[in-house]
Image: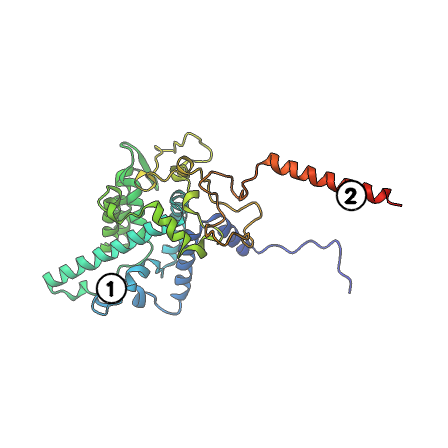
Amino acid sequence: MSSNPNASPPETNPVLSGYESFVQNTPLVTRYVMTTLTVSWFVSWFVDPVFPLANIPLFTIYHFELYRIVLSPLICSSLLSLIFAYISFTDNGKRLEYSMGSTGFLWLILTIGGMTNLVFVAVCLFFYYVTAAQAFLVMPSQGIWIILLGVIAVECSNAPEGTKRKLFVFEVPTLYYPIAILFLFSLFGGFSLAYLISVGVGYAYGYGYLDRLKVTNATFTRWEDGCLNNFTRRQGWVVGHAATGANAWLPLNNPAGNEEGGGWTPTAITRGRNANQETGGTVASAPSGGWGTPAKKDASSSKPAFPSSRGQTLGGGSTRTSDDARAARLAALERRAAASQGEENTP
């Protein structure tokens, strides 16, 4: 049976197309976090992830299950929470990761999530020993919002005076925007001690009280050349010297960088991270040949295939100039023409 040559091609799967677009346009750490939250939500249909992974002082301290301090922010058992995470975290995560680099952004969320959980455990144990109420030992700290609220607080802590951000139909002073979100959550979902601590940790980070936890760019580079080298080769990883700094907050349709309601950039995070000024880096994007198999590199080099500190363009691994390359091609053509002419003159 012959196939119809006029038959239209099969329609593309919208779900697959949407996922491919998400993979292509979302940097690696943000993509991994959102993918983990989605998997956690699907798993929650069959097994409750709160009991084995949530930061519950009774298990974290008395059973010495310290992994909960790191893994509890990746729990998602509510579809509504997952939707709001995609709306809020994906945009903020993209900007921060392009601004700081993937290593810096990963360290930021680990710092805020870890500090929030550590302070949460300390506060719960304090009230337990003071009041003898066992409810404080089984109070959970979980979900991506214990990171996201802290990140928002870091962003807003150094906002220029007088700027505002929209919360639905209301305009809230940028400095108090995280508190407004916390109040909204408490109004509809009940008070959460972990959320309150997360906002406090974010403000403390933004105002410089946690500067000792910040890591230098040189340390990030050593990590990328060492334990994170495998991840630097994957699609969407933003190498430190390719981070865009405060330029990640520039709107595409407004070169002046003034957003509606008073634009600003979170200098507490991006301070000193403008790669265009420091190292000549560019925004991390797919190389000219796509995200295929990485090009072969010199065995003595462990740097990923991103722009070097000399400011060469993305994918420009060679140090030869365009004039040298053009001269080499012309010489090759002349040799080929001379060889062909010699063969024709041979009897």
Residue 266 rendering spot, x and y as whole percentages: 33, 39
> Going 14% across and 63% down the picture, which residue do you hit?
128
* Count of numbered badges drawn on the protein: 2
> Going 43% across and 55% down the picture, which residue do you hit?
229
At label 1, which amino acid type do we have? Answer: Ile
Nearer to us in this view, 23 or 271? 271
> Going 38% across and 65% down the picture, which residue do you hit?
44
> Going 23% across and 70% down the picture, which residue do you hit?
63
Nearer to us in this view, 210 or 37? 210
At label 2, which amino acid type do we have? Answer: Ala
Mark 2 crowd level (few <14, some 14–19, many ≥20, 10 Å Cα): few
Q: Which residue is mark 2?
A: 339
Visible residue check, residue 170: no
**Is 59 located above or below residue 297 in the figure?**
below
**Is 91 located above or below residue 158 in the figure?**
below
Residue 12 rendering spot, x and y as whole percentages: 60, 54
Q: Secondary structure at mark 2?
A: helix
Q: Are marks 2 and 1 in contact (CB under 8 Å)?
A: no
Nearer to us in this view, 147 or 344? 344
Horizontally, is 2 left or right of 86 in the view? right
Q: Earlier in the sequence, mark 2 or mark 1?
A: 1
Residue 262 rendering spot, x and y as whole percentages: 34, 32
Mark 1 crowd level (few <14, some 14–19, many ≥20, 10 Å Cα): many
Q: Which residue is mark 1?
A: 56
